[in-house]
Amino acid sequence: MQMLAKLLVVIAFLAGAYLTSLHPTEVDWTAFGPIIIAGALGVIMSKRLEAAAAKDDSVLASNRQDLEDSLKNIVQNLSDLDGRKDKVPTYDMRFEIDKLFREDLMRFADARETMKHLYGVQAYADIMSSFAAGERYINRVWSASTDGYVDEVLTYVSKSLSQFKHAQEEFNKAVSSAR
């Protein structure tokens, strides 16, 4: 069904482009109008199907587990990295970040919309606010590592850990209140 909706959008786009290319200054609105409506219906149908799929119980359960596991891994790996940050050469810190966090950050980002369905928009905002700040700090560490700024690398590893710990607290609070 999703394929049909997207096919409708593509066909409407191509038909609209063809109709508008027939004359340089005029558009045949009697033919163009229904094509616009067909394209809009395709978009609406596609969005509704996506929303229904996102609320499926199996998807919600899988994503909830991904969110919990990835956030736990991030905090655990970041705590470990914070404890030994002065032993990691500054220029190698970016490789540590890629190795330790890339997969979990992507997994969390892919599943994050599930939090809206499970815990509500306010909980989503509370979690994502700290998560996004922690992610920005990790990116800052990566950039500082590339440029060789030792003090900035050491400072922002700790700041990132603090933000991710807060995101985990907010996540655990949302899980507790949903039960």
Image (cartoon, grey):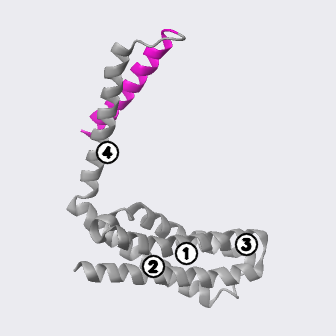
Which residue is identified by label 1? 134
**Is 20 inside the magenta-drawn segment?**
yes
Q: Which residue is mark 3?
A: 144
| Most frequent secondary structure within the magenta stretch | helix
* Residue nearest the viewer, comparing 100 with 135: 135
Which one is earlier in the sequence, the residue at label 3 or at label 4?
A: 4
**Of discs 3 and 2, which sits in the foreground?**
2
Tell me the quarter of the picture where residue 88 sits: bottom right
Amino acid on which disc 4 is placed: Lys
Residue 96: x %, y % from top left:
62, 74
Query: In terms of image quadrants, where is residue 16?
Result: top left
Task: Specify the quadrant of the image occupied by residue 114.
Answer: bottom left
Mark sitting earlier along the chain (3/1): 1
**How many numbered callouts?**
4
Instruction: Return the x and y of residue 13 as percentages of the image width and height.
Output: 41, 26
Residue ranking furthest to the bottom: 83
Q: Are marks 4 and 1 in contact (CB under 8 Å)?
A: no
Q: Which badge, 4 or 1, comes first in the chain's sequence?
A: 4
